[in-house]
Image: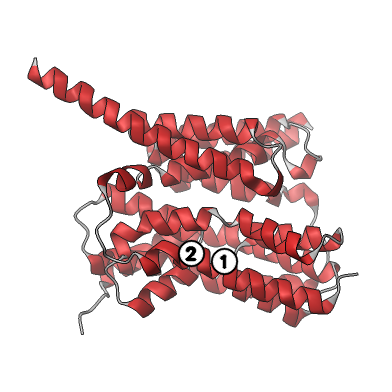
Amino acid sequence: MIDKSDLWIIIIAMGIGSFGLRFLFLGLVGDREMPPWVLRHLRYTAVAVLPGLVAPLVLWPAATGGQPDPARMAAALVTLGVGYFSKNVLAAIFCGAATLYLGLFFLS
Amino acid sequence: MPSYYDRPTYLRGIRDGMPFILVVAPFALLFGVVATEAGLTVFETMTFSAVVIAGAAQFTALQLMHDNAPTVVVIASALAVNLRMAMYSASLTPHLGALPFWRRAFAAYTLVDQSYALSTLEYEKNPAMTLAQKTSYFFGVITPVLPNWYLWSLIGAMVGQSIPPELALDFAVPITFIAMIGPMLRTGAHVAAAFVSVTCAILFAFLPWNLGLIVAGVAGMMTGAQMELWLDRKTSSEDAS
């Protein structure tokens, strides 16, 4: 059972901490000029963080107890391919979801 | 007082954000269900969701509390999962940094994976956007997303029963992120950054507190920046010859 006073400490600390992380640069740096080398690194934030965030979720899905799953892997590859070539986020999501359900239906 | 509202761009943001209801709703619902199953009241669940708005960090915290981890470890781990928000914040600063203080504070509160990813994609596609347009797009994206985050957390907390695992809702999150990554891979530098990120995330997955993702993020950013310099030099030396 979760202790209620601990729970509230955790909720409040996570609230302050999460806001602090989100506010860190946007709030404190504002429109001050940043050096070119910093900007050059920031241009790649999205492509450096998001793929790393999803790679373990694709390889070791929690839903299968961490076992690699062919349906989920196929869905990930189709989504990436459609997104890359069509530049259309929605088309990629729908093709990926369709692949996932077809894969789950036929492969398991 | 200058206006930061550009109606067509705001509406475009809403339209682009709309599909993410399909992602946010199941995720919030799931959190509501899991939190009440762990013994949280509806009020505690809702406060948690409204104050933190970070599904992955909230799930991490719940799991560790359930395992009776020390409070400090719970907070540190959950915030480590959220460290990427600091990188997002830094990356949006050149675009939104000129906003007045309170608007920056509000933008920071609503800075989540979806608003960040869609906005950067949009700003990169249209570098000529004005501050008003950039702001309107950002808040447009969040307009359908955030209320649904609250609403579906509440529904989950009130329904409080398991969702059939056959629906494979666990994979809604990876699919939507991958769908956003595809169009972002515009140059060789972007592809290299993403490749290094995936490789490092897998190699360093054994690290505690989600630190593998931070390693992957930093390595990916350095790869992208170095690759950009190298590609620039190659182009200019070809121009010279």
Instruction: Tell me residue B156's x, y (percent).
Output: 73, 70
Amino acid type at image mark 1? Ser
Query: Who is closer to the viewer here, B129 or B198?
Result: B198
Residue marked by disc 2:
A22
Question: Which residue is rendered at x = 8% and y = 19% of the image?
Answer: B240
Q: Helix or strand or loop: what does disc 1 sit on?
A: helix
Residue B201: percent from the left, percent from the top? 60, 36
User: Residue A87, located in which quarter of the rendered image?
Assistant: top left
The color scheme shown is secondary structure
* Residue beneath the point at 66% across and 47% down: B210
A35 and B99: which one is in front? A35
Q: Quadrant of the C terminus of chain B?
A: top left
Is residue A16 visible in the rendered image? The answer is yes
Is B1 on the left-hand or right-hand side of B102? left
Front residue of B198/A28: it is A28
Q: How crowded is mark 1: few (under 14 residues within 10 Å), some or many (20 or more)?
A: many
Above or below B148: residue B174? above
User: A8 left or right of B198?
Assistant: right
